[in-house]
Image (tube, rainbow, N blue to C red):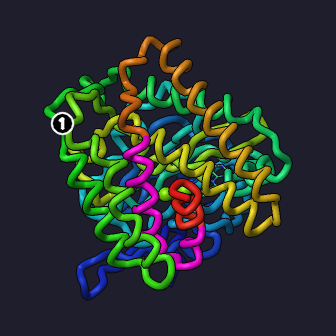
Amino acid sequence: MEHSPWPTVERRPDGMLALEAGAGVTQSVVRALARGAAPPPPFTVRALAPLPEVPPGERAITVDQTNHSVIAGEAVVVKWFPVPSRAPHPAPALLTHLAGFARTATPYAVIFWEDALVALVTAYLPGARDGWEWCVDEAVAGRTAFATEIGRLAAELHAAMASPSEAFPDPVRLPPPLAFAARAEDALGEALALTGGDDGEWLARHAGALRAEMASLSSTGRTPLIHIHGDLHVGQILQWRDGYAVVDFDGNPTVTEAEVFQPAARDLAQLLTSLDHVGQVAILRRSADPAATAAWVTAVREELGTAYENGLADAGRADLLDRSLVRPFEIEQECRELIYAARHLPRWRYAPMGVLRAWFA
Ligand code: ADP
Ligand code: MG
Ligand code: MG
């Protein structure tokens, strides 16, 4: 039997799909796309930009990741989804919408198998390291200059999200307030239910204080909603040869279109809390001095927030940020980190717990 250079996709008994891209598959798919060759049905390809010439060779990305990303010819990254979802996926429309936004890896193509999104093909950013590496180095060294650049980058991203395109002719929406308070309360309730031991006791003792910080969400007025990144933490910000870039726009395919439109403050809150997590990582894994690291966290949060607001103002989009939402969303985010730790990565619990204990000391 002739070896197919495309991945295998199987229907599992539970109805889900399972994709496998074995050795050599990524480079042959990328080279086929660059030649303009038609994919074997039921694969289809939506081209977003012409692929460059790609030399042979491939290597998998080995950092912590949700999906299976492979670099072909040191030029192109293919992010394969091992469990492709048949639900309409927000990524293709979003990548089209962001076509003019330069500070990301250029999207080249989207690959489908029947109606399921199976891969995103983007430019490889040479020398890229994600923020769980480069930003922890900054914390250990006590350097803060990056925070202004990252704040500006986030503001540019949100300004681009808020600019109309064919994909999103009405990118800024003003519906009646969403149920922000109920969503935050659900996150707290779930974090309380899933967190055991000393940490669980601490959380139960401080539930009232956490609730008090989120209380203002029930009186939030109309606030503009944009298609946010939805998973904006330093791990999605790559430092590479030419600066910083933000990646991983495919988010969570289980969220509906109504949910991807959110206040900009949600992305900002997640980005800010990720700086607190970087501080925890620096202390625990790199033996950074706790007092110096706490001062570093305070400084970079301040600098990033200021640069973000200045960036929005310069883009004429100061209206996108309702500052009063940032703190409540930060508390909610830490609850979500605890839920994530309980469900997927128990060793991560120290980071949100360290942050909450510092905030409510
Ligand atoms: P996941 O959804 O699996 O987290 P990401 O898109 O965030 O996938 O990619 C995982 C990792 O792969 C990133 O943290 C980064 O280290 C690396 N990476 C992703 N895209 C690129 C790119 N275009 N160039 C270089 N490295 C990349
Ligand atoms: Mg990622
Ligand atoms: Mg991701």
Determine which quarter of the picture holds residue 172: top left
Determine which quarter of the picture holds residue 347: bottom right
Determine which quarter of the picture holds residue 30: bottom right
Q: What residue lies at 69% left-to-right and 47% top-to-bottom?
A: 75
Q: Which residues are magenta?
A: 327-350
Nearer the observer, 255 or 164 = 255
- Specify whether residue 331 is painted magenta: yes
Q: Looking at the image, how many numbered discs can be counted on the residues?
A: 1
**Residue 249 coordinates in the image, percent (x, y):** 46, 46
| Predominant SS of the magenta segment | helix
- The amino acid on which the numbered mark 1 sits, given as a three-letter code, is Pro
- Specify whether residue 111 is painted magenta: no
196 vs 216: above or below: below
SS class, disc 1: loop
6 vs 127: above or below: below
Q: From the viewer's perspective, tell me whether residue 300 is left or right of residue 2.
A: right
Q: Quadrant of the C terminus?
A: bottom right
Q: What residue lies at 64% left-to-right and 70% top-to-bottom?
A: 24
Q: From the viewer's perspective, tell me whether residue 216 is left or right of residue 198.
A: left
**Residue 86 coordinates in the image, percent (x, y):** 26, 63
Q: What residue lies at 44% left-to-right and 11% top-to-bottom?
A: 316
244 vs 215: above or below: above
**Residue 28 coordinates in the image, percent (x, y):** 60, 61
**Image quadrant, ligand 2:** bottom right
Residue at numbered disc 1: 177
Q: From the viewer's perspective, tell me whether residue 186 is left or right of residue 345.
A: left
**Residue 309 coordinates in the image, percent (x, y):** 52, 23
> Which residue of the protein is positioned furthest toward the right in this rendering?
141
> Which residue of the protein is positioned furthest toward the left in this rendering?
176
Nearer the observer, 178 or 191 = 191
